Image (cartoon, rainbow, N blue to C red):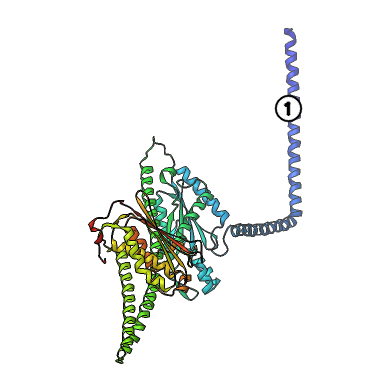
Amino acid sequence: MNNSLPGENERAKQRLVLLTSQADAVRAELARLGRDLAALHREEHECHAPGLQAANEKLVIAALEAAAVADKAKQGLAGLVASSQRDELTNTPNRALTLERLEHAIGLARRHDTLMAVLFLDLDHLKLINDSLGHSAGDAALQLTARRLESIVRSTDTVSRHGGDEFVVVLSELKRPSDAAELALQMLEALAIPTCIGGHVLSLTASIGISIFPLDAATGPHLIEIADSAMYVVKRLGGSQFAFDPANEIAGNVRTQDMSGPPRRAVADRAGMAQLRLANEQLVVAALAAHELKDLADEARGKEIKFMAMVAHELRSPLTPIQLAADMLSLNYANETKLKKLQAIIGEEVEHLVYLIEDLLDASRISTGKLRMEQADVDLGAVLAQAVHAKMSNITERDQTIEATLTEEPVVVRGSKVRLKQIFSNLLDNASKYTPVGGHIELGMTLTDNEVTVVVADNGIGIPAHALPHIFDLFVQEAGALSLHGGGLGIGLALVHELVAAHHGTVSARSAGRNQGSRFTVVLPCLGTPPSAAADGGNETG
């Protein structure tokens, strides 16, 4: 085997030389082919260069035109999207976009542990502007409102027209509820700045309701609903102010805080909100009270005017016969009979005047709280008999009958003999006046352990159901009663009511309706002992 190794090595060398020469030949052929291919490319390029350049230029132009068309289409699409999310008149976000921004503001408030507010604003009296100056002036007022609201809020807040004359303002990331109140006040002040609309200088006013996240609600639609309700509270109070939701209590609406963290800001916010809500509630109550007082003042003013007209009419009635009688007396009639008749006329009419003036004085004393009564033990039966005797002449003149049913034993009450007689004289006089000729009147008295009940009933014109609740009001007379007896100041029954109350009693009126008669019931506390010697006293006039 050792003798064969040199021969094997020699053959391997020869084979390697052959393979090397073949590889060199292949490399030379590949180089030649590369040179030929490059030359071929140069020739092809030189032949087609003008055509390729023209095609390339057209391609560039087409690409530029396509880009321009794409940009224009993109801009048009963006404008279409924007216009579909804006109010055409005020260019403010519409409801859909406002709800999106509201949800975004709620999300920020949750992440950053802050508050956010929704303000629901309604312009006051826009209908008046539309009706008096035209809808163009109303549109100008809406546009002005949008711009002035936008000038108050931050760029991160949203002012949107909710519809008609209503606007919704979304205030994001507030530190305190009072921040929303401050911005609402600034909005009202901005709207109140006079401006020229439709050729007229106007100051706009608005009603604003405020809801706070998360104190009032946790969702956008609910916050808008609560702010809307608060706005209507303001609207009913006359507008031109703002209010939070008066229905929610702070303790029930403040979200539970993690007490492991710093609670001071939460406590401060709750305290500030409580004070703001309390002030707002007091404002609402004060406004309601002011409106109620205004209504009462207007009603009192109307009654005063009506009363003065009645007084003038009633005082003029007896003055006419007095004047005629005085004129006739001045003629020096020698006939003594005529002189006595004229004197009687004057005496009757003067007595009528005294009666009217006494009623007016009593009404004045009661209304000013200056009515005074000397208290004594009084036999009520004797007082009723005196009242019947005093009114018997009037009852007889009208051809009426009266039936008095009184107890035989003395019935003692504590009070004023003069005023008690006045009570029942007025009731009997009222029954006689409003009972036609030939009518019937009843006076009855019943006694219990500690009360005495006196009833004055008649078969006269009765009292309509609508008049019963006001029958004891001062200066009030029912129209049907005036048609039968066209006089009086409407004081008698009001005096009865007040004098009975001064004796710690009650008086009530009942009637089945027109022409069904009337029934007045007086209930007084009863002592049940014989009258003292002082029963004959009490001659005060108040």
Q: How many marks?
A: 1
Amino acid at circle 1:
Thr
Whole-percent x and y of residue 217? 49, 47
Q: Residue at x 33, y 72 (%)?
A: 355
Q: In the rendered view of the protein, which quadrant contains the C terminus?
A: bottom left
User: Which residue, as the protein is rendered here, is positioned at the far front?
Assistant: 408
Whole-percent x and y of residue 232? 48, 58
Report crowding for label 1: few under 14, some 14 to 19, many 20 or more residues within 10 A (C-alpha): few
Whole-percent x and y of residue 213? 46, 47
Q: Is residue 115 toward the left or the right of residue 138 in the image? A: left
Name which quarter of the figure residue 268 lies in. top left
Name which quarter of the figure residue 34 lies in. top right
Would you say residue 8 is visible in this rendering?
yes
Would you say residue 297 is visible in this rendering?
no
User: Which residue, as the protein is rendered here, is positioned at the far top?
Assistant: 1
Whole-percent x and y of residue 8? 75, 14
In depth, the one of 496 and 534 nearer the eye is 534
Residue labelled with disc 1? 20
In depth, the one of 29 and 316 nearer the eye is 316
Name which quarter of the figure residue 23 lies in. top right
Q: Is residue 110 toward the left or the right of residue 88 in the image? A: left
Q: Residue at x 37, y 43 (%)?
A: 265
Q: Is residue 530 toward the left or the right of residue 426 in the image? A: left
Is residue 150 positioned above or below 275 on the image? below
Q: Secondary structure at mark 1?
A: helix
Q: In the rendered view of the protein, which quadrant contains the N terminus?
A: top right
Q: Residue at x 30, y 57 (%)?
A: 379
In depth, the one of 150 and 334 nearer the eye is 334
Q: Residue at x 76, y 36 (%)?
A: 29
Is residue 326 positioned above or below 421 on the image? below
In depth, the one of 264 and 331 nearer the eye is 331
